[in-house]
Amino acid sequence: MSAPLVAVIMGSQSDWDTMRHAAETLAALAIPHDVRIVSAHRTPDRMYAFAKGAEAEGFKVVIAGAGGAAHLPGMVASLTTLPVFGVPVESKAMSGLDSLYSIVQMPAGIPVGTLAIGRAGATNAALLAAAVLALGDAGLAQRLKDFRAARTAQVAERPV
Ligand code: RP5
């Protein structure tokens, strides 16, 4: 098994139902990845250790999902220069708008590439990670093209 290139982290076990779509998409593209629960407020020491050590661990991209007061992606981005993609997890109180705003509105200087709320965001975070990694990996670039072509082929001319 190759060393993981993408870290998929989330604030809670309850985020897994959303974030598994990132992991499944990475797996479909044969991108080695690791999945961890890292909470900015419940396990701050774990978050700090993860973010400070992510580059040395060999990760190239971090995908971070969180809901509500979703400070995890921004906090991680403040501790590493690896690209961080944030996935707003749909919350009960505000349907994920709180998550979206708290991830997307980073002050200038510490970027978090913010995706859509929920499953679409998790899937697209993985595809963006793939696109970044494909810049230096011809095999992955081809797999990504094949992935797109397969989805194109699934679209019927007319509805049934
Ligand atoms: C955040 O609070 C997590 O990212 C999760 O989306 C939300 C709720 O967490 P649980 O109370 O379900 O653990 O930290």
Image (cartoon, rainbow, N blue to C red):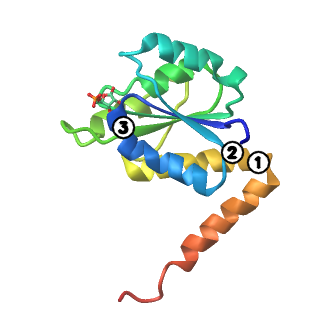
Residue 15 has which mark?
A: 3
Between circles 3 and 1, the one closer to the viewer is 3
Q: How far apart in space, not on screen, are marks 3 and 1 (Cα)? A: 29 Å
Q: Do the residues labelled 1 and 2 touch (CB within 8 Å)?
A: yes
Q: How far across and down, in percent of the image, does residue 80 sit?
A: 62, 20
Q: How far apart in space, not on screen, are marks 2 and 3 (Cα)? A: 24 Å
Picture quarter with the N terminus: top right
Q: Nearer the viewer, residue 133 or 57?
A: 57
Residue 135 has which mark?
A: 1
Q: Name the residue under label 2.
A: 132
Mark 3 vs ligand 1: CB below 8 Å: yes
The residue sitting at 54% across, 53% down in the picture is 25
Badge 1: few (under 14), some or many (20 or more) residues near its Cα, within 10 Å? few
Q: How far across and down, in percent of the image, does residue 48 sit?
A: 53, 13
Query: Element at badge 1?
Result: loop
Residue 33 sits in which quadrant?
Answer: top right
Mark 2 vs ligand 1: CB below 8 Å: no
Decide: is 63 above or below 138.
above
The amino acid on which the numbered mark 1 sits, given as a three-letter code, is Leu
Residue 93 has which mark?
A: none
The amino acid on which the numbered mark 3 sits, given as a three-letter code, is Asp
Badge 2: few (under 14), some or many (20 or more) residues near its Cα, within 10 Å? some
